[in-house]
Image (cartoon, rainbow, N blue to C red):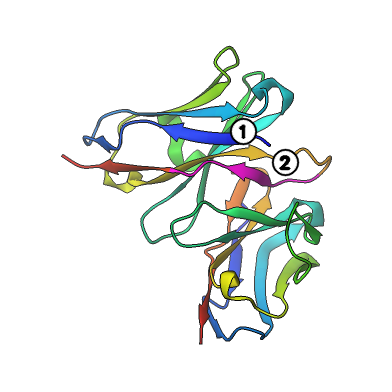
Amino acid sequence: QVQLQESGPGLIKPSGTLSLTCAVSGGSISSFRWWSWVRQPPGKGLEWIGEVFQGGDVNYNPSLGSRLTLSVDRSKNQFSLILTSVTAADTAMYYCAKHMTVSGTRGFDSWGQGTLVTVSS
Amino acid sequence: EIVLTQSPGTLSLSPGERATLSCRASQSLPSNFLAWYQQRPGQAPRLLIYGASSRATGIPDRFVGSGSGTDFTLTINRLEPEDFAVYYCQGYGDSPRYTFGQGTKLEFK
């Protein structure tokens, strides 16, 4: 069973850059198609950030505009998120997730435990 | 953008009762593009239902998904103590690709 583990700094200063990595274990990242990032502000609901294909194609949530970059490193079996010009509104638990592979359906069947990112000076 | 509206916001029930959670989409959604998740406190979300009605691996059969078009329902029969959590529906569309409902909190009565 595929397992995911997020890593990255827990505290970032306003206007700084957030960088997170999701390590994939129990399977090759190339064996699956799409991978996503989802975030959840404290006490609030889930927001889809974006998705990256194992070959590198991406789709982003327009709400994040040009601040977001997602990428895959197949040699390290991991994928990454970079979010620039962060503000307090970016404070959230960040999850990485694996898309399910049942043909024609959509959903995330494996999730990391999440990493809390706080934007504060 | 597909907007998903969940109701009620909070549902207060007792173990053994039946819970009925609603998810309404702002536009018609193919059934295979609707999923449900459970999130317990301090945990990541867990996929319960995909394709509107198919249970994910390991999900008990007391969890039943149904619906089509713009109206979808998650029914939880014979509530167990571990079922008290927050539930989210998720849809797939054009932009953004994925959206979530605001969640329904299932709490002890």
Of helix, strand and loop, which one carries label 1?
strand
Residue corresponding to mark 1? A35
Q: Quadrant of residue B59?
A: bottom right
Residue corresponding to mark 2? A100
Residue A56 appears in view: yes
Question: Which residue occupies the extreme right position in the image?
Answer: A103
Circles 2 and 1 in contact, beta carbons < 8 Å: no
In the rendered image, residue B101, in percent from the top left (x then y), is placed at 57, 61
Q: Are marks 2 and 1 on the same chain?
A: yes
In the rendered image, residue B87, in percent from the top left (x then y), is placed at 58, 65
The type of residue carrying mark 2 is Met
Other-residue count near label 1 (Cα within 10 Å), few / some / many at <14 / 14–19 / ≥20: many
Residue B97 appears in view: no
In the rendered image, residue B93, in percent from the top left (x then y), is placed at 68, 47
Other-residue count near label 2 (Cα within 10 Å), few / some / many at <14 / 14–19 / ≥20: many
Callout 1: chain: A
Q: Is residue B15 above or below residue A86?
A: below
Magenta: predominant secondary structure element? loop
Q: Does residue B41 show up magenta in the picture?
A: no
Q: Is residue B71 above or below residue B58?
A: below
Of helix, strand and loop, which one carries label 2?
loop
The magenta region covers A105-114
Q: Quadrant of residue A55?
A: top right
Decide which of tag 2 and tag 1 comes sooner along the chain: 1
The type of residue carrying mark 1 is Trp
